[in-house]
Image (tube, rainbow, N blue to C red):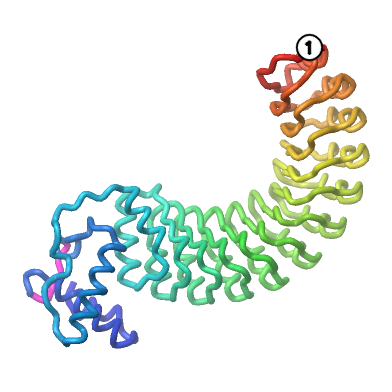
Amino acid sequence: MSQAEYLREHEGMNSGVTGEAKAYFKFKDKDGNGELDEAEWMAGKQRPLEHWWKQFDRWWEKNNRNNSVTKDPLSVDPKPVIEKQDQVKNKSKINTLTVEQAAELVTETGHAGQKQDLNLDSLTEINQEVARELAKFQGESLFLNGLSAIDKDVAQELVKFQGKRLSLHGLRSIDKDVAQELGKWQGNDLQLDGLSEINTSAAQELGKWQGLYLDLNGLSEINTSVAQELAKFQAKRLSLNSLTAIDKDIARELMKFPGSFVLKGLRSIDKDVAQELGKCQGNYLNLNGLESIDKEVEQELGKWQGQTLHLYGLTSINEKVAAELANFKGDIELNGLSEINTSVAQELAKFQGANLRLVGLKSIEAKTLALLKVNPKIVLPNIQPRNE
């Protein structure tokens, strides 16, 4: 790479950045021929990035005042021992990046292999050029949860990341343009748990995303129009864990989504909402936040034709609810029950679905345990019955 080619990447930037780039090139060009070969470029790459830039900043500030460039600031111990976890620790402290820093960070982390994650959660802001460099990372996951806002140009670069997971939990809101760009990302898992609200136009753009898992666990409420747009998302799972209550109209729109649902924020639902949730088209329906249900609610949920119904939040049930649960044809997770009485056990023992998990039981009478053990489809913990 020639100096002209290297500096071309810095066109349009301020004079300070351009000067920094020239100085960087000069001290990397060990043989002074105006060209950087691979050996010169990689020299010193084993040093921790944060440590290197602190040295360079001090060196640059000193020499910029004198309008001169002195010796290479990296003329220190040529064989430092750097542990991998120390590098990760350094990355966790980075809150700003230049284009050159981003490029070097991506190069260093990429050497660890394609299953490596790049966690830059302490980074609070980036521009389009830095985003372009970070998107070149070849690992599985890119974590940028410290960013509270991004514009369309930054989003446009980030979606070029070819990994599986893009985590932007720090974003508090996004407009239609940003949502439109994020909707073009071709990865699997888009994480946007920081969004506390979303309008219909942004939801419409996110609904076009072709990934697998969309996490919007920061939304505490949505209207029917937003639910309608999110339901157009064609994937495996939609998570909305901060919704603490929904009405039947919102539930009806959400259940048009073709995948599984995670709605762990719901504390209670009525019969009408349960009737709509029973139309879920995915393999699992996670309602672990429900603290209690009555016979009518479970009767509606029991009509669901999916694979696994998660009800971890239930700490107690009566025999009428147990009778309805026993009619479910798939798997039921009731691991929140720490104890049950004989009448409830008698009903659960009639379960004829795939599996009924009761692994959270801590205390049970011998005769009650015996009732449950008769049914091989009931999964129990290794527990000693208490004396009657």
Query: Can you say whether 198 is above or below 310 in the image?
Result: below
For residue 24, which quarter of the picture?
bottom left
Q: Is residue 366 above or below residue 318?
A: above
Q: What is the x, y in percent for residue 139?
A: 40, 53
Which residue is situated farthest in the front direction here?
387
Q: Nearer the viewer, residue 371 or 129?
A: 371
Q: Which residue is mark 1?
A: 387
Say above or below: 125 vs 238: below
Disc 1 on helix, strand or loop?
loop
* Residue 270, position as x, y percentages in the image: 90, 48
Is 36 contained in the magenta span? yes
Depth check, front residue: 280 or 338: 338
Residue for point 90% across, 38% down: 299
Quadrant position of the C terminus in the picture: top right
| In this rendering, position of residue 111 left or right of residue 354 | left
Position of residue 327 in the picture relative to residue 233 (left or right): right
Residue 92 locus on image (x, y percent): 41, 58
- Give the residues in magenta: 33-38
Image quarter in which the N terminus is found: bottom left
Label 1 environment density (alpha carbons within 10 Å; few <14, some 14–19, many ≥20): few
Left or right of 382 on screen, residue 123: left
* Residue drawn where x is 78% and y is 67% of the image: 225
Q: Residue 361: where, in percent of width, then height?
A: 73, 25
Q: Residue at x 28, y 47 (%)?
A: 83
Q: Nearer the viewer, residue 299 or 320?
A: 320
The residue drawn where x is 43% and y is 75% is 128
Kind of residue at disc 1:
Asn
Whether 295 is among the magenta residues is no
Work out whether residue 275 or residue 240 is closer to the camera in this orientation and state it. Answer: 240
